[in-house]
Amino acid sequence: MSDQMPSPTAARLYSLDALRGFDMFWIMGAEEIVHYAHNILDSSFLAAFSNQLTHPEWNGFAFYDLIFPLFLFIAGVASPYSLGRELALGKSKATVSLRIAKRAFILILLGLVVNQGIHIIPIAEIRFGSVLGRIGLAYLFANLIFIYTRREWMNYVWFAGFLIAYYLLLKFNAAPGFPAGDLTQAGNFASYLDRLIMPGKLYLGNHDPEGLASTIPAISTGILGILVGNYLKNNTSDGNTKAIRLALIGVAFIAVGWIWNFDFPINKNLWSSSFVMHVGGLSMLLLAFFYYFIDVRGYKNWAFFFKVIGMNSILIYISGRFINWEYTTKGLFGWVGELIGDPFNIVIMAILFVTVKWVFLHGLYKMKIFLKV
């Protein structure tokens, strides 16, 4: 791996924006297309696909569990290109740290807006845990570690340290009345800590999938992204070699995650250490694929659809709080659904729902309007 201090001249990765868009595509309505198609058609493939777009109740893994950590991983990969450029151009670490803290604060606030809307309600009724809030906190700590760590190898220590510390915290502790190492929803120590220290309400009453305690291993997800971004930006190997190495490391991470799963189950709700390894490996495989075909081989046309989404990913994520997309889609294309009729109209309307969002994002892309946090 290369030295940590980045070069100011490295180009922005087209593949990173495309992968971010691919990630967001599945939660901006594409998953509903698959679910509706599965309900209509007797297809084992669609049944399996639809099942992969649903979160497991507790332990286990489905493709849908990858969406959130992949986004956080991508945010980490982007850091050496954005924050690293500022450092290389002479900005002080204090100035860059202030920008990091500001972005984290805005993400936490946006997370509260997504959860509750813009309302004044009692603190006891507010859910403070959120997807954007976790991204903000993990982004904050991962990037501060990155810019203040003098030796790159120390980032690996931080990465492993958070995972091992979290593993030990949950394996040798539990909620009162449960045996040490209990990893059930009610008995695990992370959820117990959240019940003690988090204000407001938890998403599931006794557990919040975006709680404070489980943010500890999420920091490692952010650090992993930063390490990968630093490698892609600064390593002098050719693109083919980088993609192959990244894919091989990804496979190794998945293997470690599977092995660790026997003792510490892969669990998105707890953001378990085995989960971090598993989704980290999958994230590296996906990035290796996108990087190789887009940035190395130059096949960019097919990825434009996803890049349009990726360039305004935060905007489309929070837009549902301000835009009634279903109403808009029915207003514009309700006649199409009526023309097609049952049962396929619901699938077509789901496709048009995603299309309306994409056209909106494309318009912003053409006007160079991007929500930057």
Image: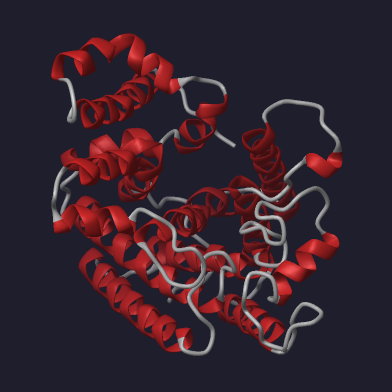
Q: Position of residue 130 (x, y in %)?
A: 64, 48
Q: Position of residue 247 (x, y in %)?
A: 28, 72
Pick whichever, 175 or 250, lies toward us.
175
Q: Position of residue 80 (x, y in %)?
A: 51, 57
Pick whichever, 218 or 308, lies toward us.
218
Please identify the quadrant where the C terminus is shown.
top right
Pick whichever, 57 or 157, lies toward us.
57
Picture quarter containing residue 115? top right
The residue lying at 54 percent from left, 32 percent from top is 318
Q: Is residue 363 left or right of residue 290?
A: right
Please identify the quadrant where the N terminus is shown.
bottom left
The residue lying at 28 percent from left, 64 percent from top is 288
Q: Is residue 336 above or below residue 239?
A: above
Picture quarter containing residue 236? bottom left
Q: How many marks?
A: 0
The residue lying at 35 percent from left, 53 percent from top is 53
Q: Is residue 354 above or below residue 240?
A: above
Picture quarter containing residue 114? top right
The residue lying at 71 percent from left, 38 percent from top is 109
Q: Is residue 254 above or below residue 339?
A: below
Q: Position of residue 364 (x, y in %)?
A: 40, 21
